[in-house]
Image: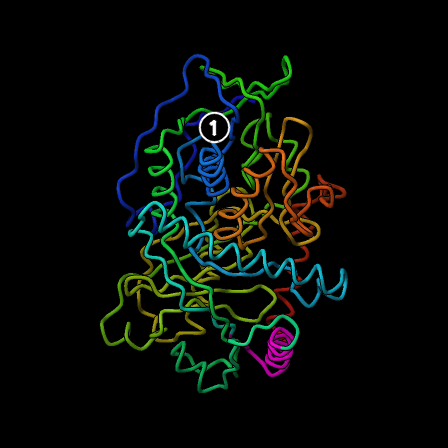
Amino acid sequence: MTRDWSALPSANSLWEATAGPAHAFPVLSGERQADVVIIGAGYTGLSAAHHIAKSGLSPIVLEANRPGWGASGRNGGVITAKFRLSFREIDAAHGRAMAQRMYEIAHESTDMVEELVSEFGIASAALTRTGQVKAAHNETTLKAAIDEANWMTREMGSAEVRILDKRGVRDETGSDIFVGGVLNPGSGGIHPLNYLRGLADGVARRGVPIFQESPVVRLRKENGGIVAETPQGAVRAKQAIIATNSYSDLTSATAHMQRTLIPFRSAMVATDPLPRNLAGKLMPTGRTYTETKRMMRWFRMVDNRVIFGGRGAFGKQDSQAAFDALRKAMVGIFPDLADVPLAHKWSGLVAMTMDSVPHIGRLDDRTLVSMGYNGAGVAMSSLMGRYLAAFVRGETPEVGLLDIRRMKAIPFYPLREPAVRMVAGWYQFLDAIGQ
């Protein structure tokens, strides 16, 4: 596959505008040797490189563009201990032991972010662990959220979950439109690009080579090992890790992974800094927030700006229609923002899977993969780096439903985009009529 890498657009995000300086990594030239070659310098790849190096092995990281160009620099910076599939659904379908293991993995993931921020001293990541509020837009969804919270308290031991009435959610958000909600502790927020750049700089300082603008155009087995070829060089290794997630189709070497994923574009907007009186009124506790509609919106306050995001942006590029819909939804929740200009608009790809959970493990004796984070990847991808290192060492960590052997290809793959549009359109209709 031939691609003009210099033509790939940046995110034009709030994160790019406010991030610290980016370290310029070299382009791979010539041949290198490593124990493990890692394709992708996002959270997954860099966490894997860190944990592999701690094991005494030698990794090399190859990035097609620059670290943070993909999903790791385009997300909303929300950290949650959850999967798109609820723990109650996991319990019903797979039993209590599996639900408990998945609960442990989810909470381990948020702790991993805190561990990495501390390990590398990434103060600019501005990590918070203040919790997340799920705000209900009608009594039906509020009841469902309360039932879920009560089940989590009773069955999973989540004693800190709190039920909020209408006034409680109004005090939390500054909005009158919600009828109540649930506060989940342990979740939080982060500056995702500063976190990513801090990981890259920290890993590089510890001697792990990182090469940017070095897309892997061919991955082949050779003499008991594996060779990752780039336009100007190659890495010969014993094992390879594919950590490209929704951007797997950037080259033909990893494009086959895309058949297990449904790329879903997630759009975000950020306002200008708010006047002091308004900034103090909206989201004063500094938590992150989601709503209960099917086409879920999320929002948070960062440096006196409102960041508002959600699914429903279609196509391969940013969509003005999606940004307009986000602004309309934002003003619907926060009427005081009607006259506040938007300073940034951007989007990125979320990798959805058929069973709503990520997958990790071995594709074969030399190739490992972790991807499919379903919109909750900041924490989970950070943790998966540690599990990938365990697989590299020949261990078999217990990953529950994340086991790659459970991963399913997308049926009727060429029809995935119109199918996503159809389902999303139906969800938007149900949200519009209050169902």
In the image, is residue 403 above or below residue 57? below
Label 1: which residue?
59
Position of the C terminus by quadrant: bottom right
- Quadrant of the rendered image containing residue 90: bottom right
Secondary structure category for the residue under label 1? strand
Q: Please state which of residues 237 and 24 is positioned toward the viewer in this rendering.
A: 237
Residue type at the position of mark 1: Pro
Left or right: residue 316 versus residue 272 is right
In the image, is residue 398 above or below residue 106? above
Q: Position of residue 385 (x, y in %)?
A: 52, 42
Dot 1 alpha-carbon crowd within 10 angstroms: few under 14, some 14 to 19, many 20 or more: many
Range drawn in magenta: 135-153
**Which residue extends farthest left?**
276
Left or right: residue 296 versus residue 359 is left
Q: Please state which of residues 76 and 120 is positioned toward the viewer in this rendering.
A: 120
What secondary structure predominates along the stretch shown in magenta?
Answer: helix
Q: Position of residue 146 (x, y in %)?
A: 60, 80
Q: Position of residue 381 (x, y in %)?
A: 52, 47
